[in-house]
Amino acid sequence: MRGKFITLEGVDGAGKSTHHAWLIDHLRACGKQVVATREPGGTPLGETLRGLLLSQPMHLETEALLMFAARREHLDKVILPALERGDWVVSDRFTDASFAYQGGGRGLPPARLETLETWVQGGFQPDLTLLFDVPVEISRARLAATGHALDRFEQEQGEFFERVRQAYLQRAGQFPRRIVRIDAALPLDEITKTLEKTVSTICS
């Protein structure tokens, strides 16, 4: 039986990493074999590209092409083989992030992203996408509180992240059966209850 593919999305500082770890533990407790991964990254080549993408200034189209190049490797080497084995794959970001960051944030026309999406993925999409949505001022405050050095994306201004957030919400409206919005401003225990309920719809 084919496994399931779950992705986590949201602006930087929305709390994805915390819930990524919880979701993996939860699925394993349900008896699932789980592959935890992330984008950009997930493969040796993908992690090398991640280092460039998060640190080096580059043309917008170069940025988008490298994101999808890393994604092609990710699909070929990690995601699709795991699903064929019957494993579940949980990824911190996938293609929705490209539409939000390179599209909404940076202004790359959606048609170009759609062309890349079709070329790299065909019709393949996640079984479930959890969109952690939080007002930008909260996400920025959370990022500042971590004290870690900010990467090239995290250093962007609030206006950039508001465009990213709105692109995510637009994407959720486009694909309501796949993308579930999670109010990430709620207390942690309430978010966990929502996640348990949401994941139970496919965790059978």
Image (cartoon, rainbow, N blue to C red):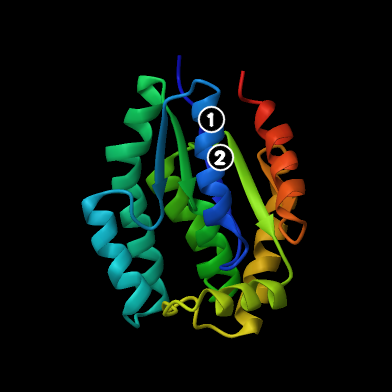
Q: Residues within 10 Å of mark 2 (few under 14, many from 20)?
A: many
Q: Quadrant of the N terminus?
A: top left
Asked whether residue 125 is in view, the answer is no
The Cα atoms of the two marked residues, 1 and 2, are separated by 6 Å
| Amino acid bearing label 2 | Leu
Within 10 Å of disc 1 (Cα), the crowding (few <14, some 14-19, many 20+) is some
- The image shows residue 195 at horizontal and vertical percentages of 68, 40
Disc number at residue 85? none
The residue sitting at 53% across, 30% down in the picture is 27
| Residue nearest the viewer, comparing 56 with 61 | 56
Q: Are marks 1 and 2 in contact (CB under 8 Å)?
A: yes
Tell me where residue 77 appears, x and y as whole percent. 27, 39
Left or right side of 180 for 71: left
Q: Which mark is residue 23?
A: 2
**How many numbered discs?**
2
Amino acid type indicated by mark 1: Leu
Residue 11, by quadrant, is bottom right
x and y percentages locating residue 24 in the rendered image: 50, 38
Residue receiving disc 1: 27
In x, y percent, where is residue 2? 45, 20
| Residue 69 in the figure: left or right of residue 167 | left
**Left or right: where 196 falls relative to 13:** right
Q: Residue furthest top?
A: 1
Specify the quadrant of the image occupied by residue 193.
Answer: top right
The residue under the point 72% across, 50% down is: 182
